[in-house]
């Protein structure tokens, strides 16, 4: 085996006073590295998009949403009667699968904000003190998140998009108008904090405030809410939590005749999640194409090396080295080239991903992509899977050109020497 390694090393380096890697080896290494770089960056971006968009949707509407079945799809004007202990039971179910799960009640109401001559319709999302503050904390630009536990129900979170439209700053006051079709109800609001998520659908129209304010303008009783949101940090547990909560609520329906309806975030935003699924298909297509390209690069490089060293191969055959042993020589060469390409490809991919994740130099149009920058997420299982598939596939493809060695006949190659 050491003899084959020594021969492979001789074939890899030029025969000069200062040995250097042969140009064909360098080109093959660069080709492999660029292929791996493209594949890994594609996976990082897709994983980043999925994580970022899912996180935002779940942050706004919850991983699982429970409401009165008399509401139309994604509308919560009909209140849900909240039995004592229901949220505690749902919290226990959710945390049995995800210890960091959060459950809180909400009530939504459409309203109008008017400052001087500027006005806009907004969706007022009223929450209780248990709401998912960690989500908004990631996107806070200025101010602080209200606790919604004090005597005042006037404090609200507003997006920077709305704040710029109304020329409002943290601490400023404005009036909101709500109507039931017959009369208007006016409430004073205080801007406690400003956030920006890049999810324009919500940034342009969402106010987050106290559920008590919504109850007062919508005419809800103290034990009535618009619905219940369950937030999970582990997206893989959504299906399990949904099923367990469904069984629990179905049991309450049979026992107390309580009525509920449930949706997951994927059901409420099926179009967006279908789009993310299509992105997955594109990445796997890129993976297959890059494996083919890397394989062709390696095959071409091996064939060029065989042609360059055809006399040396013939001489080694004359000295008694078998075709099998010579094929192992070129497998050593392939492993060397592939190893360097994989190393450099991974290093560059991690470096570029780290730069984007830290400083976010690559920007996007949030109105089209639901985020203001190119999101990336490094998942080590993706990294391991991609490298393993590429290494195995390319090494199997390299077996093709090594068969050429068996067709080299020493008598024909060396007879003019």
Image (cartoon, rainbow, N blue to C red):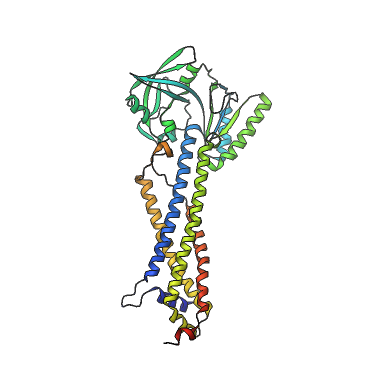
Left or right: residue 91 compared with residue 10: right
Left or right: residue 267 compared with residue 375: right
User: 308 or 256: which is nearer to us?
Assistant: 308
Left or right: residue 98 compared with residue 9: right
Residue 41 visible in rendering: yes
Residue 234 visible in rendering: no
Above-or-below relation of 182 to 168: above
- Where residue 6 appears, as percent x and y from the top left, is 43, 77
Above-or-below relation of 339 to 328: above
User: 417 or 64: which is nearer to us?
Assistant: 417
Question: For the C terminus, which image quadrant?
Answer: bottom left
- Which residue is rendered at x = 44% and y = 35% of the image? 135
- Which residue is rendered at x = 38% and y = 46% of the image? 357
- Where residue 198 appears, as percent x and y from the top left, is 40, 36
User: 39 or 208: which is nearer to us?
Assistant: 39
- Where residue 265 appears, as percent x and y from the top left, is 53, 35
- Quadrant of the rendered image containing residue 114: top left
- Which residue is rendered at x = 37% and y = 52% of the image? 352
Q: Residue furthest right?
A: 254
């Amino acid at each position: 085996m050491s003899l084959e390694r020594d021969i492979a090393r001789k074939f890899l380096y030029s025969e000069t006073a200062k040995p250097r890697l042969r140009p064909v080896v360098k080109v093959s290494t660069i080709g492999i590295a660029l292929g791996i770089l493209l594949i890994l960056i594609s996976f990082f971006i897709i994983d980043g998009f999925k994580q970022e968009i899912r996180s935002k949707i779940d942050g706004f509407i919850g991983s699982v949403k429970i409401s009165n079945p008399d509401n139309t799809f994604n509308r919560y004007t009909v209140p849900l009667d909240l039995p004592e202990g229901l949220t505690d039971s749902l919290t226990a179910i959710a945390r049995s699968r995800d210890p960091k799960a959060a459950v809180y009640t909400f009530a939504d109401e459409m309203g109008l904000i008017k400052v001087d001559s500027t006005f806009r319709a907004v969706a007022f999302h009223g929450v209780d003190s248990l709401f998912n503050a960690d989500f908004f904390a990631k996107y806070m630009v200025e101010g602080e998140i209200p606790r919604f536990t004090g005597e005042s129900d006037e404090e609200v979170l507003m997006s920077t998009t709305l704040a710029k439209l109304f020329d409002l700053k943290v601490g400023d006051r404005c009036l909101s108008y709500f109507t039931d079709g017959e009369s208007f109800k006016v409430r004073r609001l205080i801007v406690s904090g400003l956030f920006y998520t890049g999810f324009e659908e919500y940034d342009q129209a969402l106010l987050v405030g106290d559920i008590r304010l919504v109850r007062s303008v919508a005419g809800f009783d103290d034990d009535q809410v618009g619905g219940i949101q369950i937030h999970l940090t582990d997206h893989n547990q959504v299906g399990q939590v949904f099923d367990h909560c469904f069984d629990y609520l179905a049991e309450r329906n049979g026992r107390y005749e309580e009525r509920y309806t449930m949706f997951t975030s994927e059901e409420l935003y099926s179009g967006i999640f279908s789009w993310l699924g299509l992105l997955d298909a594109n990445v796997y297509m890129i993976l297959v194409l890059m494996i083919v390209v890397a394989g062709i690069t390696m095959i071409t490089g091996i064939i060029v090396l065989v042609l360059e060293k055809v006399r040396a191969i013939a001489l080694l055959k004359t000295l008694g080295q078998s075709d099998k042993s010579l094929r192992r020589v070129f497998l050593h060469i392939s492993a060397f080239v592939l190893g360097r390409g994989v190393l450099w490809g991974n290093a560059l991919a991690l470096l570029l991903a780290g730069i984007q994740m830290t400083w976010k130099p690559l920007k996007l149009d949030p109105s089209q992509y639901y985020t203001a920058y190119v999101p990336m997420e490094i998942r080590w299982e993706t990294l391991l899977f991609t490298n393993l598939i590429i290494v195995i596939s390319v090494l199997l493809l390299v077996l093709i050109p090594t068969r050429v060695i068996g067709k080299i006949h020493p008598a024909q190659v060396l007879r003019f020497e």
